[in-house]
Image (cartoon, rainbow, N blue to C red):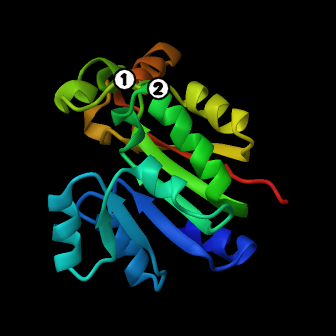
Amino acid sequence: LETVQAARARAGEGGVLDIGCGRGEWLKVLAEAGIEATGIDLSPVMAEHCRAQGLDVAPGDAVRALADRPAESLTVITGLHLIEHLPFAVLYRLFEEVARVLRPQGVCIFETPNPENVLVGSHTFYHDATHSNPLTPTAMRFLAEYHGFHTVETRRLHPYPPEARVPGSDPLTERVNGHLCGPQDYALIGQKPRA
């Protein structure tokens, strides 16, 4: 939320779009903070569910929806647990459109499962049969920078609870805990440079 607010202060209070908005949880958080945002979801059922809650959501394809928007027309674009569902060619095109549609100093935020956590990368990622491939933070940072984003940040999120950790504080135990109990997700945050 603070990242969205900072982007709007920097780049102007242009539009905020959540792609793949699902049940609209993030849109509700934004609304509660007084930030007008719209959503798009491939599922007409999810879009209708959101509209029934008073959220501004349309059914549709994210890449197509972005392609229909004018250049530099949005301040923030978010996609939470979306990019891991996309084939690479679509993901590449998504970043291309996001870079085109964002205003200078606007931001994109993409959250995805973190394969640096071995349990996530080898097991829990596959609980969702619609997931395509785990996406490493390094690869996603490269993709964002390739499309012209700078000040790209990787924010690791949602570690396993402390009781899941192996007892001990020696370097090997800490390393094991990092790989097995570390952050289950990460957010890629990319800022579009000034014009």
| Number of the label disc, if any, that sits on residue 122 | none
Position of 115 relative to 48 (above/below): above
Q: Residue at x 60, y 67 (%)?
A: 74
Q: Is residue 61 left or right of residue 175?
A: left
Residue 97: percent from left, percent from top = 58, 48
> Is 186 positioned to the left or the right of 46 in the image?
right
Q: Is residue 106 visible?
A: yes
Q: Which amino acid lies under the numbered mark 1 shown in the image of this protein?
A: Asn
Q: 123 above or below 189?
A: above
Label 1 neighbourhood size at 10 Å, few (<14), some (14-19), many (20+)?
Answer: some
Point out residue 185 in the picture as x, y percentages from the top left corner. Answer: 40, 39
SS label for mark 1: loop
Residue behind mark 2: 88
Amino acid marked by disc 2: Phe
Image vertical order of residue 186 relative to residue 64, above or below: above
Coordinates of residue 164 in the picture (x, y in percent): 26, 33
Q: How many marks?
A: 2
Q: Position of residue 96 (x, y in %)?
A: 61, 42
Instruction: Tell me the tag on residue 133.
Output: 1
Gap in angstroms between the C-alphas marked 2 and 1: 9 Å
**Left or right: 176 in relation to 12:** left
Point out the frontmost of discs 2 and 1. 2
Residue 65, by quadrant, is: bottom left
Residue drawn at (63%, 68%) of the image: 73
First in sequence: mark 2 vs mark 1: 2
Do callouts 2 and 1 mark residues in contact (Cβ within 8 Å)? yes
